[in-house]
Image (cartoon, rainbow, N blue to C red):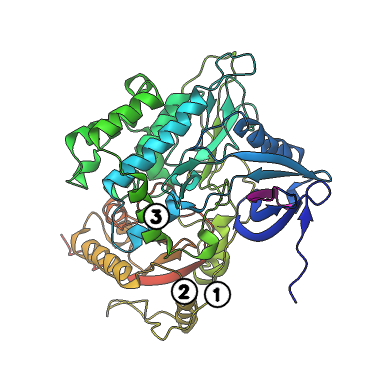
């Protein structure tokens, strides 16, 4: 006998179904309305332990307040704001599809790129949504631009009908308001934050368009715009040098290159003046696919996704690499970048280490898989994990060590074997491809890195690689020991990490696997 369904909202107006996704702040459930009109929706519900936090509840309601100002086919609608006692509930449009993040990774993991015309169609929809937000007016008809501030593949849902929907206005800014973020600070996903925001300036519509440009670059190139560890990514983001996507994808034409490069221009005034202008330029450069063509692409990727990854509406996927920096108050002229980097404000960064990293690499003292600058403030973390049931697997020979490397301990081998079994149940995991990439990197380091003596080289001992699997089928490779020389770090950064920006902690981690060990050749004496 199945348990009784939970009734929520005033007088049990809604019946909750299964959980569609879990984020740092909330869980999103499928729900139906108990009324003659009925209907199926998504209900976003704060985690119980956050209900006592006034700031969190205010941010939650801010999202609803902002989204209800917008009525656009490319924006996830807020259908209702209900209350279950003192608990606020956001009743959202249920998008039958999946996030761009999930779909693109499903495509990437099977060795395919998102078709350029599909990328153009999806980004055109995104620009239409942002255009509506940027052109919003208040109740008196005065201009009151809404800046999303968290544009990324996580927050773009692609429906089975081929229509893209922008979600999650939880940290958006209305006009000159600070939105849900405390005065003097802001948050966003590393890799999609504009240079002016990193410099402590207030974000505007151009900041959203910059993030769209990063998404478009990564869809075209099928790789990340910014790669490396935490500090390296920050350095690249602040650099004025940008490479066109055609360097990685020769079929990207010059006109499309120009659109992308203008969108990610570090100087604000050199970017597109509006979402509408960028959309027009994109359509001229690359004709967007039809709705039916996008729908067919969604269907081709969607069957590879776990059920829990289908259509995570509005914040079902937790934000990645949330950074907090000083943002000037309105009455103060922006100063030169005075930054406070907060490393990985998500408990998800600790999930993998609890499962594998800490167990395997107890000598490591850092809290994540990548290096970070000194933390100058506390990091509040909320764990948001997703799990997959293990499937039987007989091939446990994932770690491949060179013949001159000491064998891994029995405990490490057992841990890796168990983790591989769990990871094997996830779709799109290509262990062989990842192993080949690591082997090639190992060879390059051993053969070419001669920029110091063994102790300076940073690789005199076996070095570990951590392979991380995600619920949506994404996988990442991260080196876990160091320090590394400049040469070794450069080679390690060449390991494919996937098509989107951010740190390896973009979503809830399912499992980590100790993949490999390398021991470099001793440099020849001078």
Identified at 22% across, 47% down, the residue is 248
Q: Which sits earlier in the primary sequence, circle 1 or circle 2? A: 1
Residue 224 higher or lower than 427, as above or below: above
In magenta stretch: residue 44: yes
- State the residue position of label 2: 425
Q: CA distance from mark 1 to mark 2?
A: 7 Å
Q: Dots 1 and 2: beta carbons under 8 Å?
A: yes
- State the residue position of label 1: 389
| Marking on residue 298 | 3
Residue 347 visible to the viewer: yes
Within-10-Å neighbours for mark 2: few <14, some 14–19, many 20+: some
Q: Which sits earlier in the primary sequence, circle 3 or circle 1? A: 3
Q: Which residues are magenta?
A: 37-47
In magenta stretch: residue 238: no
Q: Dots 3 and 1: beta carbons under 8 Å?
A: no
Classify mark 3: helix, strand or loop. Answer: helix
């Amino acid at each position: 006998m199945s348990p009784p369904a939970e009734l929520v909202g005033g007088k049990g107006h809604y019946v909750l179904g299964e959980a569609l996704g879990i984020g740092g702040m909330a869980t999103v459930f499928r729900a139906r309305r108990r009324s003659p009109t009925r209907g199926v929706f998504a209900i976003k519900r704060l985690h119980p332990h956050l209900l006592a936090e006034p700031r969190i509840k205010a941010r939650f309601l801010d999202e609803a307040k902002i989204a209800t100002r917008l009525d656009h086919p490319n924006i996830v609608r807020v259908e209702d704001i209900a209350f279950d006692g003192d608990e606020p509930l956001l009743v959202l449009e249920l998008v039958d599809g999946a996030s761009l993040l999930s779909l693109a990774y499903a495509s990437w993991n099977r060795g395919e790129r998102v078709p350029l015309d599909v990328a153009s169609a999806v980004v055109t929809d995104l620009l239409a949504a942002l255009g509506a937000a940027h052109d919003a007016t208040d109740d008196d008809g005065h201009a009151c631009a809404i800046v999303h501030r968290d544009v990324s593949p996580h927050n773009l849902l692609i429906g089975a009908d081929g229509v893209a929907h922008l979600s999650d206005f939880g940290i958006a800014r209305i006009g000159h308001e600070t939105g849900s973020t405390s005065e003097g600070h802001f948050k966003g996903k590393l890799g999609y934050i504009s240079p002016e925001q990193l410099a402590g300036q207030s974000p505007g519509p151009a900041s959203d368009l910059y993030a769209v440009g990063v998404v478009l670059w990564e869809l075209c190139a099928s790789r990340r715009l910014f790669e490396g560890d935490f500090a390296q990514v920050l350095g690249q983001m602040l650099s004025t040098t940008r490479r066109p996507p055609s360097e990685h994808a020769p079929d990207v034409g010059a006109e499309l290159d120009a659109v992308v490069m203008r969108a990610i221009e570090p100087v604000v005034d050199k970017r597109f003046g509006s979402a509408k202008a960028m959309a027009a330029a994109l359509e001229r450069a690359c004709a967007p696919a039809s709705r039916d063509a996008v729908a067919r692409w969604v269907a081709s990727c969607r069957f590879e996704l776990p059920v829990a990854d289908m259509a995570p509406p509005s914040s079902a996927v937790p934000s990645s690499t949330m950074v907090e920096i000083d943002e000037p108050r309105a009455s103060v002229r922006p100063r030169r970048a005075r930054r406070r980097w907060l490393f990985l404000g998500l408990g998800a960064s600790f999930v993998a280490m609890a499962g594998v990293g800490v167990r395997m690499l107890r000598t490591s003292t850092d809290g994540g898989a990548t290096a970070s600058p000194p933390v100058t403030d506390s990091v509040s973390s909320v764990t948001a994990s997703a799990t997959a049931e293990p499937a039987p697997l007989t091939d446990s020979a994932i770690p491949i060590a060179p013949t001159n490397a000491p064998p891994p301990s029995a405990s490490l081998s057992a841990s890796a074997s168990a983790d591989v079994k769990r990871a094997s149940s996830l779709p799109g995991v290509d262990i062989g491809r990842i192993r080949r990439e690591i082997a090639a990197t190992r060879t390059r380091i051993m053969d070419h890195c001669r920029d110091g003596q063994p102790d300076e080289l940073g690789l005199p001992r076996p070095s570990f690689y951590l392979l991380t699997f995600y619920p949506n089928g994404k996988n990442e490779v991260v080196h876990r020991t160091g320090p590394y020389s400049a040469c070794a770090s450069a080679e390690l950064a060449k390991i494919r990490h996937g098509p989107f920006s951010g740190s390896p902690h973009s979503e809830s981690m399912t499992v980590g696997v100790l993949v490999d060990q390398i021991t470099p050749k001793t440099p020849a004496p001078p």
